[in-house]
Amino acid sequence: MPSLPPVPPAGSLGARFVTLVTKVHVAVFRATGGRLGSTSGGMAPTLLLNHLGAKSHTRRTTPLLYLSDGDDVVIVASRGGSPKSPGWYHNLKAHPATTVELKGEKRAVTARQATPAERGRLWPRLVEMYSDYAVYQSRADREIPVMVLEPGRAGASA
């Protein structure tokens, strides 16, 4: 497996740079209706996940790769294979009703963690879509959660 850089520590210059890049990505995606910013490296599709802070109740938006599975959208809480899941994962666990922005549309969804059987079926497809997920899983001391976003009512983070 190739060696990928670890997730920068919170508060570091690297983490602040990632935050800035994320804000620019969200702004470009929204300004162009997803014509720009809806693919990662020209291959994997990208959405904007709107979520509400689990404790702070602050509205947040995170660009993420996704996989379509019928009417559902599937996202991965990898955080680059770091020991902890990303903040958005905890936010969705606390506030599962939300919205996603895909190229040209905003969709109400309800988030839930994939069952073990679903994860077993989806994981190979996710790795095929974005091979670095296998690298992330190999260096994580946790099973990386897979989240299923089902069509549903929008919550407070919509």
Image (tube, helix red, strand yellow):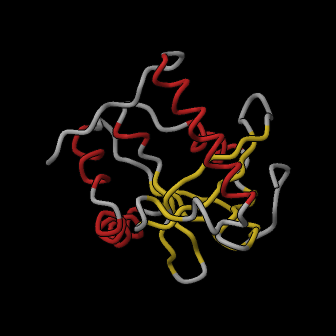
Q: Nearer the viewer, residue 50 or 38?
A: 38
**Picture coordinates of residue 154 (x, y %)?**
81, 62
Q: Is 86 rendered above or below residue 101?
A: above
Horizontal side of 131 relative to 152 (left or right) equals: left
Horizontal side of 53 relative to 4 (left or right) equals: right
Horizontal side of 90 relative to 4 (left or right) equals: right
Residue 22, quarter of the rendered image: top right
**Picture coordinates of residue 48 (x, y %)?**
64, 56
Q: Is 100 rendered above or below residue 103?
A: above
Question: Residue at 56% across / 70% down in the picture?
Answer: 73
Question: Residue at 60% across / 63% down in the picture?
Answer: 36
**Picture coordinates of residue 87 (x, y %)?**
58, 36
Question: How many marks on residues?
Answer: 0
Question: Residue at 65% across / 54% down in the picture?
Answer: 49
**Picture coordinates of residue 129 (x, y %)?**
35, 68
Locate the C terminus and report the quarter of the image it occupies: bottom right
Q: Nearer the viewer, residue 113 or 109?
A: 109
